[in-house]
Amino acid sequence: MRILLTGYYGKANFGDDVLLKVTYGLVRKWRPEADVSILCDQYIDDYVSKLINEEVSIIVPGDKGHYDVIIHGGGGTFFDFGNYGILNHIINQLIKTIGFKKYVTLDRFVRKLFNKQRLSADKRLGWGIGVGAYTSSSVKLRQNLPILLDFDALIVRDSLSIENLQSLNIDNAILGSDLAFLENLWVPSSINKDKKLHNKQRLGIVLRDWMIGSSTNYLELLAKMFPSLNERYEMSIFVFDKRVDKQLLEIAQKYKTYIWDPLEIGFDKYCKVLAQQDVLVSSRAHGAMCGAVLGVPTVLIDIEPKLRTIHEMLPNSTVLIDSKRLILENLIEKIEEMLRCERAAIVIDVARNKTLIQEAVKLTLVNNE
């Protein structure tokens, strides 16, 4: 059996590297004999093979081929916040008028006619996918529709993804959760999740560059608070994606910083340092989810709707704070609240999500043998 794994892979993003490890682990348990390949947008040396501890075939975008199964392994890969002008707005409105399914049928016919077919498979499965919104002029929408309408089984990680799919007249998704909650497939066995004892409580900062839809640069607001936070707590900044988060990297130079680089720092070591924090402040979805799995509660900075859904998934082990109203006193109040979060509350949140994604994945495998 030939299986292709695809996602936001090969880009040295810590959260998505967790998803890759989990997806690969699930596939190996399901089909240990399978010939597995991984689609990587930007493949860096052999880090993917090091990450999963096994040599694996790498496929790059543009390669053609047919597989028995294509598996989309987690992540928020279906969305588009870009503005592409009035012409693309008109094209998308025409597509909406004729119907998304008719557009996809036409797209497939034209691609076959000109020998421009996409990667294809007998079965296409999606596990723990986050589906965001598309702007009215989105170019990516036209690229994603043929994939979204091709799933034999699609597990989404939150209710907002269900709503976004329904706006595209796609109503066959299964509500599950995020693959990161399958901790046995990525959390190092040496991790200690118990309450830590430090002279100073440890504060982990897990942020991302973000200016979409806002005139306020929340990173600049936070940077002004870092000296006070660093004095009050033992503060460390975690950079999950150094290719993308250039402003965060610049700010982080003054502080203790852990930059995820799979060629320079081991995965287990990075997880261990993250687990040693007492509380996180994060604007990254996988900052909060991985944090919870590692036993660390999170103050979520609400920079986009996705973060609100993460709070709904982790109601006991996260709190929200509005990115447009960041005040030091309010942030410290939220941090102190999460420092009082009991380990049992985090366990409840993680267990619920783990059950949801386990049962959903099992259902897709049983129904698509």
Image: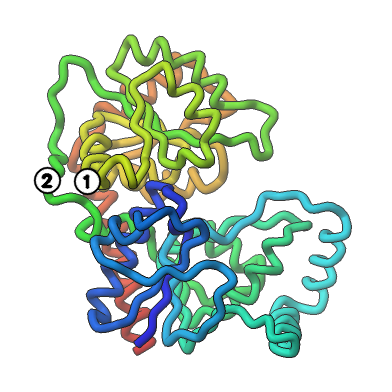
Q: Which residue is mark 1?
A: 268
How far apart are the alpha carbons under marks 2 and 1?
9 Å
Give neighbour class at mark 2: few <14, some 14-19, many 20+ (Cα, 10 Å). few
Q: Nearer the viewer, residue 159 or 272?
A: 272
Q: In x, y percent, where is residue 228?
A: 40, 10
The image quadrant that residue 253 belongs to is top left
Give neighbour class at mark 1: few <14, some 14-19, many 20+ (Cα, 10 Å). some
Which residue lies at the image location 42% right of the left edge and 16% below the top edge? 254
Secondary structure beneath label 1: helix
Query: Which quarter of the rendered picture does the N terminus lie within?
Result: bottom left
Q: Nearer the viewer, residue 77 or 58?
A: 58
Quick one: which residue is furthest to the front in this view?
45
Q: Amino acid at mark 1?
A: Asp
Q: Report the colour scheme.
A: rainbow
Label 2–label 1 contact, CB within 8 A: yes
Q: Amino acid at mark 2?
A: Ser
Of labels 2 and 1, earlier in sequence is 2
Q: Is residue 38 above or below residue 149?
A: above
Q: Nearer the viewer, residue 63 or 322?
A: 63
Which residue lies at the image location 39% right of the left edge and 49% below the top edge? 15
